[in-house]
């Protein structure tokens, strides 16, 4: 997967792209990320990227011409070497909310992305019409720029690239627990302020441990994010387990 990022703060991405799993993936060439300074595409002496809003009011608006020029230039550069047209994504609170399904779909459908990170009050509306294929939001809150959302997207996408996350883990997540929350995790000590690690995890019985984790993942989802269960594809065994959790719960209510 190849990603081009357009921003007026390219330095924000440097430590991020050098560190941890993303850093390793980039270094190993599994995942290519290029960050471009939007100001490189300006033509005036002051390298300005913003202007006053038509109609007046507070704050500045990012200018359309520089964005259109920049997106077309980096898209053409990708297109020459790659598969043709990259998918162009604007990070914005008006976009479709990012979730696991959206990350997987993006990774499966597009090998080349251009991410547009805006600042100030936003970008001239015409940029959307001319050079944006999709708007994506990372959540319903207001940030000062699209850079953090772009990093969120890049990190989530990197995990979908074969070889970036350890094989055992990804295979596992894929086949069993997709759409569910993770099970609880424990490490030493076995007892902390009276709180003990569940016995089964110390038993060495891998089949029993796996069954416990399956149930614990289901329970955690049911307790903390029941909304996720509506969309999850559950096995017959998982449905039975869910019924058991529900009747246990009703039992408690009656007691
Ligand atoms: N932005 N998810 C960039 C966001 C945002 C979000 C606000 C995007 C400011 C300039 N982007 N503009 N939430 O809050 O993606």
Image (cartoon, rainbow, N blue to C red):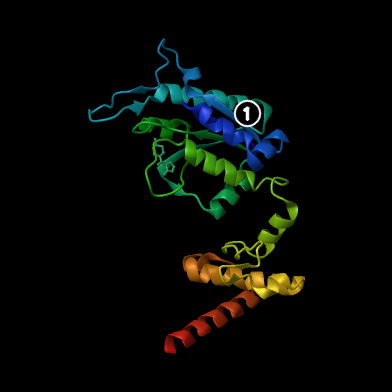
Question: Picture coordinates of residue 143 (x, y %)?
Answer: 39, 40
* Residue receiving disc 1: 79
Q: Quadrant of residue 235?
A: bottom right
- Does residue 248 appear in this view? yes
Question: Picture coordinates of residue 87 (x, y %)?
Answer: 56, 37
Eyeballing the image, is 59 above or below 139?
A: above
At x 44%, y 22%, the residue is 66
* Residue behind label 1 places its C-beta within 8 angstroms of ligand 1: no
Question: Picture coordinates of residue 244 (x, y %)?
Answer: 57, 82
Q: Quadrant of residue 190?
A: bottom right
Eyeballing the image, is 111 above or below 73?
A: below
> Dot 1: what SS?
helix
* Side of 95 relative to 186 (left or right): left
In the picture as drawn, the residue positioned furthest to the left comes out as 56
In the picture as drawn, the residue positioned furthest to the bottom comes out as 255
At x 40%, y 25%, the residue is 64
In the picture as drawn, the residue positioned furthest to the front comes out as 193
Eyeballing the image, is 143 above or below 51?
A: below
- Does residue 86 appear in this view? no
Q: Quarter holding the C terminus?
A: bottom left
Label 1 crowd (10 A; few <14 / some 14-19 / many >=20): some
* Side of 252 relative to 109 (left or right): left
């Amino acid at each position: 997967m190849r990603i081009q990022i357009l921003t007026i703060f390219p330095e924000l991405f440097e430590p991020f792209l050098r560190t941890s799993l993303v850093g390793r993936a980039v270094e190993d060439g599994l995942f290519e990320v290029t960050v471009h300074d939007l100001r490189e595409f300006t033509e005036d002496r002051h390298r300005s990227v913003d202007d006053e809003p038509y109609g007046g009011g507070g704050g500045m608006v990012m200018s359309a011409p520089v964005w259109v020029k920049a997106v077309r230039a980096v898209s053409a550069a990708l297109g020459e070497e790659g598969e043709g047209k990259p998918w162009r994504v604007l990070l914005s609170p008006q976009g479709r909310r990012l979730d696991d399904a959206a990350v997987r779909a993006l990774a499966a459908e597009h090998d080349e992305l251009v991410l547009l990170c805006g600042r100030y009050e936003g970008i001239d509306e015409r940029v959307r019409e001319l050079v944006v294929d999709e708007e994506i939001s990372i959540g319903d809150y207001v940030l000062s720029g699209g850079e953090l959302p772009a990093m969120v997207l890049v990190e989530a996408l990197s995990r979908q690239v074969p070889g970036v996350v350890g094989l055992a883990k990804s295979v596992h997540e894929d086949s069993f627990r997709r759409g569910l929350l993770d099970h609880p995790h424990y490490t030493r000590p076995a007892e902390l302020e009276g709180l003990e690690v569940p016995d089964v995890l110390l038993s060495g019985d891998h089949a029993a441990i796996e069954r416990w984790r399956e149930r614990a993942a289901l329970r955690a989802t049911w307790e903390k994010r029941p909304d996720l269960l509506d969309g999850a594809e559950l096995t017959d065994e998982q449905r039975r387990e869910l019924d058991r959790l529900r009747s246990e719960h009703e039992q408690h209510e009656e007691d």
